[in-house]
Image (cartoon, rainbow, N blue to C red):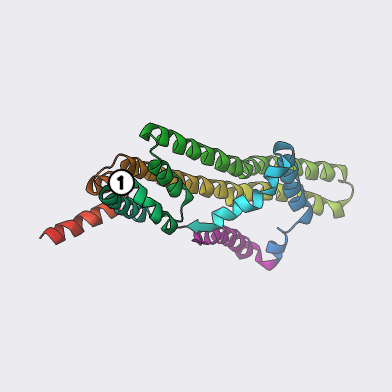
Amino acid sequence: MKKIDMLTPIGILIGISMVVFGVISSGGMSGFLAFIDVPSILIVLGGVFGTLCVSFPLKQLKNMGRVGKQAFQSKEINVEEIVGTFVHLSEKARREGLLSLEAELEQIDDSFVKKGILLAIDGVEPEMIRELLEAEIAAVEERHARGRSMFEKAGDYAPAWGMIGTLVGLVLMLKSLNTPSSLGPNMAIALLTTFYGALLPNLFFQPIAAKLAGKTEHELFVKEVIIEGVIGLQAGQNSRFVQAKLKVFAPVEKRKLEEKREHVREA
């Protein structure tokens, strides 16, 4: 079940708040309003969107919002629960055979786990199971990388468009030196496009790309755990051996806590 990943909006809000606080504390509300310049925003955001249109096909760009949404969602994947599931399945498989696991598939929501168990039930060789499941992992990694690359490229393009806006503002300013009233707006474009070109990638585009990369890394790690569990099932390994093998994938803190509990039970 997906939940809201509160750290993402909180982090963005903190970054914006620090900038706003720094501006208002130095120049008051009028100083803050001076940082709102629509032409500068349009140059940076419009330029970034234009270069993304050149860089990526329309089908991929349509998914940018859906991909970015993943950075604001948190899907709980508990490694300990996965270990427990495979321990239970290995016990049943040793008692009643691999075919008995078909009845357990309705209780499993993860399609990757289901696919692996079905391959084990069908008697596919361990090497072939690993090859098939790792091919799916590679496909997931590639798909996630393509989605993430849109935010990475946006982060790369934004500073350049900030500089382009600065050059536009400087050219306009130099052409209107004889008109003092136009110097201010042109100078605002020159400086604020650089500001937006630095703010957007460092507070939005690149952090979202990094968050998506972290989520992908964790998802692929969990899938590797699942592969080891499926191989253990297919080989008919003892449930204690399966548990010991999969437990090494659990976080160190969890393993230490479990070891302490085992010592207490033995005492």
Residue 44 on the magenta segment: no
User: Mainly helix, strand or loop, the magenta region?
Assistant: helix
> Is residue 86 in view?
yes
Q: Position of residue 24 (x, y in %)?
A: 63, 64
Q: Nearer the viewer, residue 73 or 41?
A: 73
Q: Position of residue 5 (x, y in %)?
A: 51, 60
Q: Nearer the viewer, residue 123 or 126?
A: 123
Residue, disc 1: 246
Amino acid type assigned to the residue bearing label 1 in the image: Leu
Write down the region rendered in magenta: 1-29
> Is residue 190 in view?
no
Crowding around mark 1 (Cα neighbors within 10 Å: few <14, some 14 to 19, many 20+) is many
Seen from this angle, which residue lies furthest bottom? 29
Identify the element where label 1 is drawn: helix
Q: Residue at x 37, y 44 (%)?
A: 225
Q: Is residue 72 above or below residue 117?
A: below
